[in-house]
Amino acid sequence: AQKVTQAQTEISVVEKEDVTLDCVYETRDTTYYLFWYKQPPSGELVFLIRRNSFDEQNEISGRYSWNFQKSTSSFNFTITASQVVDSAVYFCALSEEFFDQGGKLIFGQGTELSVKP
Amino acid sequence: ETGVTQTPRHLVMGMTNKKSLKCEQHLGHNAMYWYKQSAKKPLELMFVYNFKEQTENNSVPSRFSPECPNSSHLFLHLHTLQPEDSALYLCASSRNREEGVVYGYTFGSGTRLTVV
């Protein structure tokens, strides 16, 4: 069955520190998609990145980077030189192409990141 | 603004009340979703509608009743709720269910529900 685990419930860092949010997933499908969303205090989940299971290339977008490793079923998210505006809850999510679980996004429990000035 | 609008933003209701949550999108999407977000728990998928057809009911108690009159609107009707139903209820949409799997969803800001 699909499952997404974000073992870190809360992380607190000081501004300018680097921080890595962990995500480990379980799936039986060979074709699947991984996502990261950010939930600021306003509530809406904001899409950050999407990866398919055939693309293990790491990605960097400004201060954000993602490390996808199929060998360890992990899709970790690193924020470099964190800022107060990065404070939010971050969710990792998984979907499978072949609708084994009905074609839907399954979310982890989220990691609440607090960046202090 | 994500393009998915939820109203009201906050709702306090008694256990004997009946209320409805509304979700509206004008993104041209045909799949809509209700998620429940409780503290320290993963987002729980409640219902899925694809082209106005309900395609998933994730063992949700009957005190939650969804309605999708057209592809742009989704409602969640609430009656005789329990205090443990207090949560953030998030609506999401995607072009259709298949594309939602591949590209993800667009979310609203949610309705913060408190049952007293």
Image: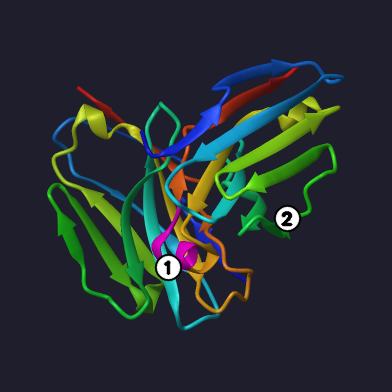
Which residues fall within the magenta stretch?
B99-105
- In this figure, which residue is indicated by the disc labeled 1? B102
Question: A70 or B11: nearer the eye?
Answer: B11
- In this figure, which residue is indicated by the disc labeled 2? B58
Residue at point 13% right, 35% down?
A16
Residue at point 68% right, 16% down?
B12
Residue B67 as seen in the image, left or right of residue B108: right
Eyeballing the image, is B13 above or below A31? above
User: N-terminal of the two: label 1 or label 2?
Assistant: 2
- The chain containing the residue under callout 2 comes to B
| Amino acid tagged 2 | Asn
Q: Quadrant of residue B17?
A: top right
- The chain containing the residue under callout 1 comes to B
Q: Regarding mark 1 in the picture, which secondary structure is present there? A: helix
Residue at point 68% right, 45% down?
B69
Name the dominant secondary structure of the magenta segment: helix
Question: A1 or A32: nearer the eye?
Answer: A32
Of all residues, the one furthest to the bottom in this rendering is A30
> Does any portion of residue A113 appear in the rendered image?
no
Image position, residue A56 (x, y; %): 27, 75
Image position, residue B108 (x, y; %): 47, 37
Does B35 lie within the magenta span? no
> Does any portion of residue A99 appear in the rendered image?
yes
Q: Mark 1 and mark 2, same subunit? A: yes
Q: Regarding mark 2 in the picture, which secondary structure is present there? A: loop
Question: B93 or B112: nearer the eye?
Answer: B93
Image position, residue A87 (x, y; %): 31, 31
Dot 1 alpha-carbon crowd within 10 angstroms: few under 14, some 14 to 19, many 20 or more = many
